[in-house]
């Protein structure tokens, strides 16, 4: 694959149940980038970051990834395999990038279908919930939805909420996605537990996240780009160096691919696997609720 994908399927035996000590160690519950802070302070500081970057979030993603984030999100949605009538939850997706792709896929299915009352009923039942804790990010998403012609689409529902304590019912969602969001939460384990809770049996969890490069020369280049170039871009394009310095540091504090996969399995998911893209710059993790 042109993105440099490597997929690893992870058997249950590879992932023993994590001890409370391990959970605390890998949740980076009191870290804000490389700084140590208390939990309440972290939540506020992360909120401030995304309030600051909301208006430039998508343009900075284009600049930082040379547009590759669009292909990564396409890959994420292709793994989801959207369908008419699905109930899907996209968490930390305030600007709508993933939700729009899901809806576009569903609309293409409708166009290819045979039509009729049954298909129309399924389309009417489709709900894509975009949940984000930051109202500024949601406002950007709503504006983009209008620009894309989704402003009056009843299938798209915007929800302000916390990934660690979702307002949705048990066993209510066919799918769950979170893209570039889980490394910013205070307790990763709570997010994974909530994802498992709201998914129906057979529902798929998918997480797209910046991850860890382990190819020696590439890693050195990536580290230089991350710590020297990205904060400078943030200052130049968005007038905000500090927020992008945090974003880079938060990537390094996030668990490795193998460790994060073990956390997903520990939350109760089966058939856990991950796919590295661009040598591990990003990874797509997935699991099934059975």
Image (cartoon, grey):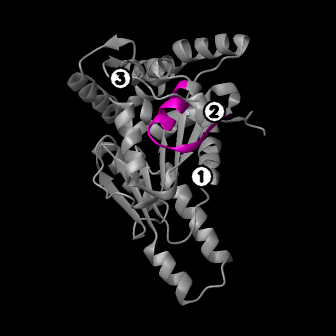
Q: Camera-side residue: 128 or 60?
A: 128
Q: Is residue 67 visible?
A: no
**N-terminal-most mark, 2 or 3:** 3
Q: Residues within 10 Å of mark 2 (few under 14, many from 20)?
A: few
Q: Position of residue 55 (x, y in %)?
A: 39, 40
Residue 80 percent coordinates (x, y): 59, 54
The kind of secondary structure element at disc 3 is: helix
Which label is found at residue 77? 1
Magenta-tinted stretch? 259-275
Looking at the rendered structure, the secondary structure element under dot 2 is loop
46 lies left or right of 82: left
Q: Quadrant of residue 184?
A: top left
Which residue is labeled 3 in the image? 20
Q: Residue at x 51, y 22 (%)?
A: 233
Residue 94, magenta (yes or no): no
**Foreground: disc 2 or disc 3:** 3
Q: Please tell me which residue is depicted at 59% across the width and 36% down the height of the picture.
A: 12
Front residue of this view, candidates 190 and 209: 190
Horizontal placement of 127 versus 208: left or right? left
| 7 sits to left or right of 263 | right
Residue under pointer 2: 66
Q: Does the magenta segment cover residue 268?
A: yes
Q: Are marks 1 and 3 in contact (CB under 8 Å)?
A: no
* SS label for mark 1: helix
Gap between marks 1 and 2 measured at Cα: 20 Å
How far apart in space, not on screen, are marks 1 and 3 (Cα)?
33 Å
Sooner in the amino-acid sequence: mark 1 or mark 2: 2
State the residue in front, 212 or 16: 16
Q: Is residue 271 above or below residue 83?
A: above
Residue 256 lies in quadrant: top right
Considering every residue shown, the one lying at the far left of the view is 40
């Amino acid at each position: 694959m042109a993105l440099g994908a490597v997929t690893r399927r992870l058997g249950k035996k590879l992932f023993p149940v994590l001890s409370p000590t391990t959970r605390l160690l890998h949740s980076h519950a009191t870290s804000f980038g490389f700084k140590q802070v208390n939990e309440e302070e972290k939540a506020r500081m992360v909120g401030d970051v995304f309030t600051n970057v909301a208006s430039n979030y998508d343009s900075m993603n284009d600049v930082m990834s040379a547009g590759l984030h669009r292909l990564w999100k396409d890959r994420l949605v292709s793994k989801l395999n959207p369908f008419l009538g699905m109930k899907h939850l996209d968490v930390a997706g305030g600007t709508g990038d993933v939700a729009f792709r899901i809806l576009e896929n569903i609309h293409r299915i409708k166009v290819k279908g045979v039509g009729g009352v049954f298909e129309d009923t399924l389309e009417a039942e489709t709900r894509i919930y975009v949940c984000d804790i930051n109202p500024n990010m949601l406002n950007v998403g709503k504006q983009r939805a209008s620009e894309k012609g989704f402003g009056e689409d009843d299938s798209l529902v915007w929800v302000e909420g916390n990934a660690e304590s979702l307002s949705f019912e048990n066993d209510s969602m066919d799918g769950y996605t979170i893209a570039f969001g889980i490394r910013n939460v205070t307790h990763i384990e709570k997010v994974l537990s909530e994802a498992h809770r709201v998914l129906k049996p057979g529902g798929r969890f998918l997480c797209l996240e910046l991850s860890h490069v382990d190819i020696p020369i590439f890693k050195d280049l990536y580290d230089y780009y991350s710590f020297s170039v990205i904060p400078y871009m943030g200052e130049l394009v968005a007038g905000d160096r500090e927020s992008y310095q945090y974003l880079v540091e938060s990537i390094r504090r996030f668990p490795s691919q193998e460790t994060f996969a073990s956390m997903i399995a520990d939350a109760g998911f089966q058939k856990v696997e991950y796919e590295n893209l661009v040598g591990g710059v990003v990874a797509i993790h997935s699991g099934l609720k059975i």
